[in-house]
């Protein structure tokens, strides 16, 4: 009986090892945070990841394709959809998650850079919105809808205005450098929570 011929993989397929892909992705995140999308080069990514440029181009056809996949896969953690039975606790959880995202300096720098770059790159902006912005807006919409059903918010609520109010106050809060050189917020989360609870009922059609 003749021996079975070993199965051969298509050329290049066996070399797409997951741990190398993961290493490249982590390097891209670091490069985006440190140098930004415009200045980031495939050469720098390859050198820092300890791989040849061919290893990157076997996975992604271009820098734009690479960054789009990295953003889509990373997405700065899944957005929570709080459901604690009352609006105040839901918003407190939503706010706590936002603080975790904002405390990640690498993520904060990448988000700021890609938001600016997206103004010049519509395809990248679409990926960024779909992966980062839309999940958080969807979570906020679900949270507000349940509050309306429970009678905590008026039936005449303008969901778009209420969502803009919520997202703006939670994610777009100004930060300043403290005496220690660290970013700080001008007011605490309890005060912010009170302001949000006061503002949302006013967001009517």
Image (cartoon, rainbow, N blue to C red):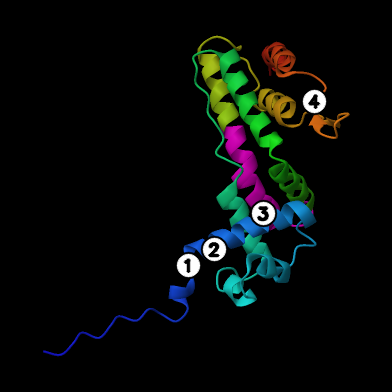
Q: CA distance from mark 1 to mark 4?
A: 43 Å
Q: Are marks 2 and 1 in contact (CB under 8 Å)?
A: yes
The residue labelled by disc 1 is: 17
Q: Which mark is residue 29?
A: 3
Q: Are marks 1 and 4 in contact (CB under 8 Å)?
A: no
User: Quadrant of the rendered structure where residue 139 is?
Assistant: top right
Query: Within 10 angstroms of label 4, few (less than 14), some, or many (20 or more) residues?
Result: few
Q: CA distance from mark 4 to mark 2?
A: 37 Å
> How would you classify the magenta stretch by its main secondary structure?
helix
| Residue span colored magenta | 119-138
Local SS, label 1: loop
Quadrant of the image for the N terminus?
bottom left
The answer, for residue 155, to whether it is visible in the render is no
Above or below, 108 relative to 46 = above
Q: Residue at x 62, y 75 (%)?
A: 52
Please state the horizontal and vertical placement of residue 103, each as a whole percent of the image.
70, 35
Please state the horizontal and vertical placement of residue 91, each as a whole percent of the image.
61, 20
């Amino acid at each position: 009986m003749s021996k079975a011929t070993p199965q051969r993989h298509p050329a290049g397929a066996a070399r797409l090892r997951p741990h190398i892909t993961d290493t490249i992705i982590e390097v891209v995140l670091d490069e985006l945070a440190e140098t930004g999308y415009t200045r980031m080069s495939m050469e720098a990514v390859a050198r820092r990841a300890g791989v040849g440029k061919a290893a990157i181009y076997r996975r992604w056809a271009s820098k734009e394709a690479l960054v789009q996949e990295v953003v889509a896969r990373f997405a700065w953690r899944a957005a929570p959809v709080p459901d604690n039975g009352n609006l105040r606790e839901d918003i407190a959880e939503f706010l706590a998650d936002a603080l975790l995202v904002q405390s990640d300096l690498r993520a904060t720098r990448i988000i700021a850079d890609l938001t600016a770059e997206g103004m010049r790159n519509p395809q990248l902006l679409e990926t960024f919105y779909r992966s980062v912005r839309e999940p958080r807006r969807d979570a906020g919409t679900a949270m507000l809808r349940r509050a309306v059903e429970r009678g905590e918010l008026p039936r005449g609520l303008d969901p778009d205005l209420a969502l803009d109010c919520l997202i703006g106050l939670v994610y777009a809060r100004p930060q300043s450098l403290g005496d220690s050189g660290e970013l700080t917020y001008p007011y605490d989360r309890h005060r912010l929570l009170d302001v949000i609870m006061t503002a949302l009922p006013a967001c009517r059609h």
